[in-house]
Image: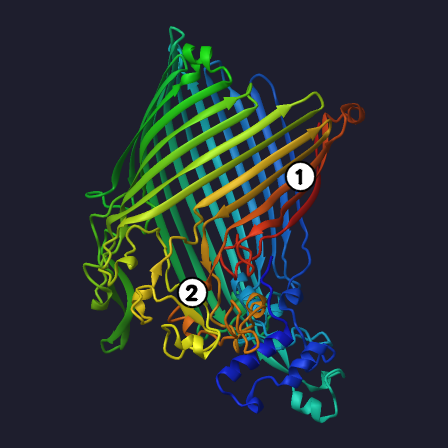
């Protein structure tokens, strides 16, 4: 699903309306009534095209493929497994510079040295070849949205039409014409493990592993100018043409793009991660009723990364995209280095009596290089869980037989987060403007203090409380699980904004004082049944989670309804829209922003004081993060046929939907074109044609009209498969053979917005692809 944009006659009509509202003379408008009719006729491609940029810029389909081959075998002492796989994905653009090719290898060998000792080695390696245009997907899609339907994407003779601005013609910048971004990535994850059953001590085992992971990246970004073609419309028409005749002779090529000449930037990055783990585990049952499982473990991990980049321009030719072929003027280079390390001590003790009374205690002591050794490096994180399998009790078995299984449980856990900007406890410096000194006029680079250190920062902490139950009914056919949770995150790193306001110009360090609460529930319900030739199952889950800010040093607000404490993180502070002004009388009858006119959005006078001002903004408790998520999976099997599917959805979320460059700087959404206010349609529920963000309700008095509900339900996966009967395949020495057809992201069942795919992060995101695949799995 991509945004539906206005066509050429609609866009031209809206621009004319917008300019008329501003008092423009018809002779000076961008489009005349005659122009609008010519766009509508659609028979003058050289002067009055009607371009659907998404249709022109996106292909109907792209080819994706994957292949996997695996072998396994062994005996009593040695077992092995190996697999090779490939994946190839094409781009969705019509002239696509996008491609993704991955090759992966998995190999592991497990050796039973004796009855006590097992050792193993596991290797996972991959190579990814990613090819992109020089401009990112966000830029391409932003200009597909902005593209004027009254401009040509590709001239009838096949040459590319003009850009929107700065060379960004989406059909060209998505291709190899401006160059390419060649990104190669190599990974090798290697693990050596051992497991020892301690002789003479039943249930006691020692295990350990060492992992050595390597990542290497080589990237080449090569840019060059390209040609776009503009029509000399005045000369074309003066020659007696009407718009349908060939205008190739009146096209002028203009060198365009972000790079005025060929230029190259090479990147080389590599990272190494070492991880060592040692674990002591003990499992034992005493007197057939007391079950104990416990372990203690130690783990450390070290990460180092480094990279360099080099830049040259003024290439003599774009046929040699290598650094040595570039000019010496303005060449540049840079580099980076990164380190990280953690040490973890953790363990768990679990006990149950007759599988009925359950108890578990866990504890972690984690140290992170991101915090200072003296103040905040170490954190202690315990947890407790208790459960009661009520269905094991005799009174339950005797009285409530239709519930086959019921376990209630509750837990508390303390967790830590160190995924914050590292080394904030150190005084930092940055390179800045230097100085010239000495008789030799030597230049020395300057060092400047960067920010204010806080030596006391430490782990962010979350205390999580859970309570719930698990159950089975009707001889195991139905299951119902439910869990309720409450989480309080404290020690969140935030800057104080009330203590020292922004207008002072003072930049304070992050401090551990933010507090956020999060609470909700999850319910899982399923029904599965088995018949002689038919089986089926339907399983659904529903979860709700809402967070609220408890403390972030909020400045004092003028009015209580703008206090963000108590609302979810990221809540939008907006004016409320309550309709569209019908006419001047309607405008004058209600409080309004100075300059409001018919067709503008009506803003609610929330404090009812007869004035629309900042105090009328209110907080909305929906954010871009959905509060509700749900899914339904199903499977039906009849003899050798099987159908599986998944429906996934979210609810209670909202997102800013509009871009700033609509009107004379970009196209309108068809959503806003349909049913908009005009002098002939004064009872509309959508505002009049607007120009960029000049209307008060587009920027300075932004309302909830600019936000849309992004709830959705989508058929995410559907697979139909057929297992070939054994007697048909065993003649060719095949154990099992299965044919399947799979569809992913097939269609939206529900969408809360008509503008964009609600599952996307924003309007300019690469679209979610509908994938149809055919395949077979064969076992020998």
Q: In this view, does 743 lie above or below 110?
A: below
Answer whether labels 2 and 1 touch (C-beta < 8 Å). Answer: no
The label nearer to you, 2 versus 1, is: 2
Q: How many marks?
A: 2
Image quarter of the N terminus: bottom right
- Name the mark on residue 719: 1
Colour scheme employed for the rendering of this structure:
rainbow
Say what secondary structure mark 1 lies in. strand
Between residues 319 and 763, which one lies in front from this camera angle?
763
Q: Is residue 733 above or below residue 702?
A: above
Binning the other alpha carbons within 10 Å of mark 1 as few (below 14), some (14 to 19) or many (20 upward) gives: some
Q: Give the image location of residue 567, x and y in percent.
A: 33, 51
Q: Give the image location of residue 413, x and y in percent.
A: 32, 33
**Residue 134 in sight:** no
- Furthest toward the bottom, the residue is 238
Binning the other alpha carbons within 10 Å of mark 2 as few (below 14), some (14 to 19) or many (20 upward) gives: some
**Residue 753 in sight:** yes
Task: Tell me the residue at 55%/27% (across/down).
Answer: 109
Query: Which residue is label 2 attached to?
Result: 577
- Name the mark on residue 172: none
Between residues 127 and 726, which one lies in front from this camera angle?
726
Q: Is residue 470 above or below residue 440?
A: above
Say what secondary structure mark 2 lies in. strand
Between residues 330 and 661, which one lies in front from this camera angle?
661
Image quarter of the C terminus: top right
Q: Give the image location of residue 767, x and y in percent.
A: 57, 56
Q: In this view, does 614 lie above or below 130?
A: below
């Amino acid at each position: 699903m991509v945004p539906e944009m206005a066509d050429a006659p609609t866009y031209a009509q809206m621009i004319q309306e917008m300019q008329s509202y501003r008092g423009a003379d018809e002779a000076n408008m961008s489009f005349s009534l005659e122009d609008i009719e010519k766009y509508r006729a659609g028979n003058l491609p050289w002067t009055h095209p009607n371009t659907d940029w998404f249709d022109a810029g996106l292909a109907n389909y792209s080819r994706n493929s994957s292949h996997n081959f695996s072998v396994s075998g062994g005996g009593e002492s040695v077992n092995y497994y190996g697999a090779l796989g490939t994946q190839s994905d094409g781009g969705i653009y019509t002239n696509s510079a996008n491609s993704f090719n991955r090759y992966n290898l998995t190999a592991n060998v497990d050796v039973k040295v004796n009855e006590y000792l097992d050792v193993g080695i596991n290797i996972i390696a991959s190579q990814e070849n990613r090819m992109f245009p020089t401009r990112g997907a966000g830029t391409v899609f932003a200009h597909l949205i902005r593209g004027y339907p009254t401009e040509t994407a590709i001239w009838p003779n096949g040459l590319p039409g003009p850009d929107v601005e700065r060379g960004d013609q989406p059909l060209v910048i998505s291709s190899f014409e401006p160059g390419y971004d060649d990104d190669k990535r190599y990974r090798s994850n290697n693990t050596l493990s051992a497991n020892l059953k301690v002789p003479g001590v039943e249930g006691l085992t020692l295990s350990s592993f060492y992992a050595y992971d390597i990542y290497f990246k080589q990237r080449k970004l090569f840019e060059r100018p390209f040609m776009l073609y503009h029509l000399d419309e005045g000369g074309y028409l003066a020659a007696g043409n009407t718009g349908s005749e060939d205008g190739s002779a009146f096209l002028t090529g203009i060198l365009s793009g972000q790079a005025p000449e060929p230029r190259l930037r090479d990147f080389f990055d590599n990272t190494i991660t070492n991880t060592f783990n040692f674990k002591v585990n003990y499992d034992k049952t005493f007197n057939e009723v007391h079950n104990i499982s416990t372990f203690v473990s130690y783990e450390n991990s070290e990460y180092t990364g480094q990279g360099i980049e080099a830049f040259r321009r003024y290439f003599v030719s774009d046929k040699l995209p290598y650094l040595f072929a570039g000019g010496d003027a303005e060449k540049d280079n840079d580099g980076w280095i990164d380190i990280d390390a953690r040490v973890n001590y953790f363990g768990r003790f679990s006990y149950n009596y007759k599988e009925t009374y359950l108890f578990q205690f866990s504890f972690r002591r984690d140290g992170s290089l991101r915090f200072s050794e003296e103040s905040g490096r170490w954190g202690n994180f315990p947890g407790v869980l208790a459960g009661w399998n009520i269905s094991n009790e005799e009174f339950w078995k005797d009285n409530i037989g239709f519930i086959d299984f019921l376990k209630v449980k509750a837990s508390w856990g303390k967790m830590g987060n160190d995924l914050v900007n590292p080394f904030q406890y150190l005084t930092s410096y940055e390179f800045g403007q230097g100085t010239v000194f000495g008789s030799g006029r030597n230049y020395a680079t300057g060092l400047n203090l960067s920010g204010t250190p806080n030596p006391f920062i430490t782990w962010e902490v979350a205390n999580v409380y859970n309570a719930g139950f698990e159950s089975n009914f009707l001889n195991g056919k139905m299951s119902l699980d439910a869990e309720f949770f409450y989480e309080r995150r404290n020690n969140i790193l935030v800057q104080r904004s009330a203590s020292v306001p922004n207008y002072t110009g003072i930049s304070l360090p992050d401090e551990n004082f933010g507090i956020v609460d999060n609470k909700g529930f999850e319910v899982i319900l399923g029904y599965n049944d088995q018949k002689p030739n038919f089986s089926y199952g339907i399983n659904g889950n529903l979860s709700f989670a809402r967070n609220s800010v408890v403390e972030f040093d909020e400045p004092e607000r003028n009015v209580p309804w703008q206090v963000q404490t108590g609302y979810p993180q990221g809540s939008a502070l907006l004016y409320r829209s309550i309709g569209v002004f019908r006419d001047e009388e309607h405008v004058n009858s209600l409080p309004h922003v100075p300059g409001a006119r018919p067709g503008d959005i009506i803003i609610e006078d929330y404090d009812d004081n007869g004035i629309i001002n900042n105090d009328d903004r209110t907080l909305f408790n929906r954010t871009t993060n959905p509060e509700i998520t749900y899914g339904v999976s199903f499977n039906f099997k009849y003899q050798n046929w099987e159908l599986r599917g998944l429906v996934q959805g979210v609810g209670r979320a909202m997102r800013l939907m509009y871009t700033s460059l609509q009107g004379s700087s970009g196209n309108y959404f068809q959503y806003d074109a349909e049913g908009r206010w005009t002098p002939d349609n004064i009872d509309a529920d959508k505002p009049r044609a607007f120009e960029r963000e000049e209307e008060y309700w587009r920027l300075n008095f932004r309302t909830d009209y600019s936000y849309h509900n992004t709830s959705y339900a989508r058929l995410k996966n559907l697979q139909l498969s057929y297992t070939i009967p054994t007697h048909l395949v065993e003649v060719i020495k095949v154990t099992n053979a299965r044919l399947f057809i799979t569809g992913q992201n097939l269609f939206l069942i529900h969408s809360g917005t008509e503008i964009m795919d609600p599952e996307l992060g924003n309007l300019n995101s690469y679209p979610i692809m509908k994938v149809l695949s055919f395949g077979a799995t064969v076992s020998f």
